[in-house]
Image (tube, rainbow, N blue to C red):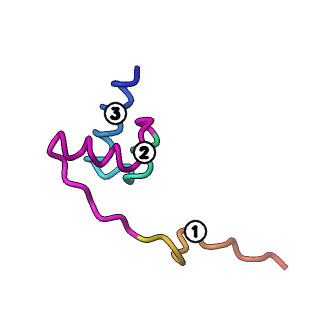
Amino acid sequence: MHSHALTQALTLYRSETLTLSQAASRAGRTEEEFAAVLHQYGIEQRPETPTVGVQTERPAPRAD
């Protein structure tokens, strides 16, 4: 099962569905271990987009 989780995480990372952190977690690896696996399989590691200060959802308007 562990190899299936790794394969799935690699596929989702390659398709840009998951971030490095998310894919590593799904694979049961640290980010460093997952980055090494990416290198082993010839998958280029993408730069992570900083999320500090980025608001992805807007709060609902107040109904006063």
Q: Which residue is mark 1?
A: 57
Q: Is residue 5 magenta?
A: no
Gap in angstroms between the C-alphas marked 1 and 2: 29 Å
Q: Amino acid at mark 1?
A: Glu
Q: Is residue 45 magenta?
A: yes
User: What is the crowding at mark 3: few (fewer than 14 residues within 10 Å), some, or many (at least 20)?
Assistant: some
Q: Amino acid at mark 2?
A: Thr
Q: Which residue is mark 2?
A: 30
Q: Secondary structure at mark 1?
A: loop
Which segment is the magenta one? Answer: 26-49
Residue that sits furthest to the top in the current view: 1
Residue 21, x across and y down, in percent: 43, 52
From the viewer's perspective, is 34 left or right of 59? Answer: left
Gap in angstroms between the C-alphas marked 3 and 2: 16 Å
Q: Which of the two discs, 1 and 2, sits closer to the camera?
A: 2
From the viewer's perspective, is 55 left or right of 47? Answer: right
Residue found 28% across the figure and 39% down from its top? 11
Q: Are marks 1 and 2 in contact (CB under 8 Å)?
A: no
Q: Secondary structure at mark 2?
A: loop
The image quadrant where one finds the N terminus is: top left
Mark found first going from the N terminus, 3 or 1: 3
Residue 31, x across and y down, in percent: 39, 49
